[in-house]
Amino acid sequence: MPAPVPRPSHAADPDGPPRRLLTALACAAVEPGLSGVLLFDLPDTHLAAVAAAFDRLLAGPAGPSVPRTTLTAATTDEELWLRPRVRRGPHGIDFALDPGPLTEPVPGPSLVVVPDLARLSVPGKRAAVQLLGADVATVEHAGLSRRWRPEARWLAACRTEDVERVPPHLLDRFPLRLTVPELRTPLGPLPTGWSTALDRARAHGSGPPLHPDADFASRVLELLDDQDGIGQRRPLALARTARALARLDGAGRLTAGHAEAAARLVRLRGARHPSVEPPPEPGAADTARSTPRILPEPRPGTDRHPAPGTPVLEPGPAEHIGSARAAGPWPPIDTPYPEDAPGPPPEDTALRTPARRATGPRAARGPVVGVRPARDLWDLAPVRTAMEAAKYRAVREGGDRLVILPRDLRGYVRAPEPVRMLTLVLDHTCREDWDWHPALEPFLQWAYVTRAPVHVVEIGGRGAPNEVRAESFTAPSTRSPRIAAALDRPPGRATPLAHGLELAEQTLRRAFQHHRAGLVEALLVVVTDGRGNVPLAASRLGRARRGAVGRTGIDDALAAAGRISGMDRTRLHVLVVDPGRQPYPELPHLLAEALDGRVVTGRPEPEAADHGQ
């Protein structure tokens, strides 16, 4: 009888999102160097449960809850470092300032919760940069002078599409980062053996020193070898995570296996767990052989277009497409460093302030991102104003009334709404043999410099929920990881070009007509070879119809392009990127003519051969 295979411990082999998150929180509880946990795409309804689980790990099953502070977009400096106290003294009411929630001395660690890191106020960001990972902190504010060792643990949440709004030096302060879009609570019970390490951390702050093996440091650097210019924070974070996993396992030494386990925990590239790798699509190796073949060019003297009912594409082996092959939502990006996604480099070109219109009421000029002392009586924040006045109610003469003085007035801080937009229509089926990144780089650079949002329409991507329908999303910036994932998505089989152009038309009309400030300029870039093989009726129905398609899909795409050409040409600019595929190279030009736009060559010209050699 063969010997049973030993099962890996929970800390060394995290499998599902709940266990991974529980492991990360336990690592932050036992390792003081892992003071910040950042969760990407955490559902808002689960933040309270995750914070409660973190509280139990820090305080123990029978201990009182740790002090908790929540930082939002409205957090000010006075709320972080100071706490006003009203006392009754020998000469009447005495007003004093005591240390605030971040500076108040407490036994053991406290918990700081940030529901949305991208919308955190500037004082909150400064506090995070100063305290996270610091050995010593100092504050000198309004008569308060204190020097202490920060022990607070930070729990923050952020959406991946908002990562570009968070400064990189603030992201680097969070050593533990996980992507948990499919998290289900509760997180589950603690594995056997973790209680000892957690009790030791609560009593002594950390456990006994662990000596690393000779290959531990080299393995940590190898796992981060493909990340250039990362500094020293990421290797230190990975090494400390490995040390925390070793403490949870009760190991006596740090080995390269602990570094591998830490890399799998955060889904570091190059050390992914086998269970998270997407399975290969059936028949993916035969995609080239099963791709429909283009019929030869018509002979001279005949009509330029095929006759009605004549298929444009000669069918290959029968393969079903449509709703029956729907694979559910597209897989999310599971990476601890979404800010490393490819895009226009910030250091190449200076950002411009987004253009803003002066028409309309001031209250309708952008979303609220915070508050500040009011400069006038426009766009006042009544709740924040009342809260500011309530702090001094006990020392003001007003009886039961709330006295509001001019210095208590607070106004909203609003982000400017951009008035330019880039719309990308990406036909994945046209890029089997060429790289479209150089062709799209100028348009993405324009959107980055002008801070224009990007609306992406994807056509024919592998793994789409429905092959006969196009998919679209809007990213607030070119730095969004969703754009990088869309540019790298492999091609599928169906090409619902007409439906993709219809989605682009609907987005542009909404942006021009219903935008609160009104778009000043929009750029539509269509990357396609023009070979649409899915009629618009089939896309709207959600499944392919039986029978010959002919050139119905192409005609529907030209009709949808004609509707776009009827829009305001002074504000909409249209470009068609031609991949230069043979045969039928005229299809992109027909589409550009219907769109009333220009054609840009996407494939670089081959270098001329040197006949002198």
Image: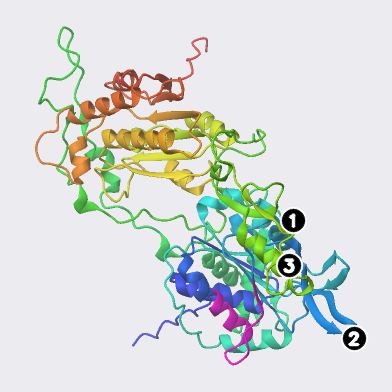
**Amino acid on which the number 2 mark rests in the picture:** Pro
Q: Residue visible at 16% across and 43% down? A: 544
Give the percent coordinates (x, y) of residue 14. 48, 73
Residue of label 3: 80
> Which labelled disc corresponds to residue 380?
none
Give the percent coordinates (x, y) of residue 317. 15, 41
Q: Residue visible at 55% across and 88% down? A: 193
Q: Reading the chain from its start, which is encountered first: label 3 or label 1?
A: 3
- Residue numbers of the magenta segment: 51-69
Of circles 3 and 1, the one toward us is 1
Give the percent coordinates (x, y) of residue 130. 76, 62
**Amino acid on which the number 3 mark rests in the picture:** Leu
Residue 343 vertical placement versus 142 (above, below) = above
Along the line of sight, the residue nearer the viewer: 534 or 542: 542
Q: In this view, does 231 lie to the left or right of 94?
A: left
Q: In this view, does 164 lie to the left or right of 590?
A: right
Q: Residue furthest bottom?
A: 62
Tell me the crowding category of disc 1: few under 14, some 14 to 19, or many 20 or more residues within 10 angstroms, Cα based: few
Residue of label 2: 90
Of circles 3 and 2, the one toward us is 2
Residue of label 1: 406
Q: Is residue 31 left or right of residue 594?
A: right
Per the model, the C-alpha gap separating discs 3 and 1 is 23 Å
Along the line of sight, the residue nearer the viewer: 3 or 156: 156
Q: Residue visible at 51% across and 44% down? A: 476
Give the percent coordinates (x, y) of residue 244. 63, 76
Q: Is mark 3 on a helix, strand or loop?
A: helix
**Amino acid on which the number 1 mark rests in the picture:** Pro
Q: Is residue 490 left or right of residue 314?
A: right
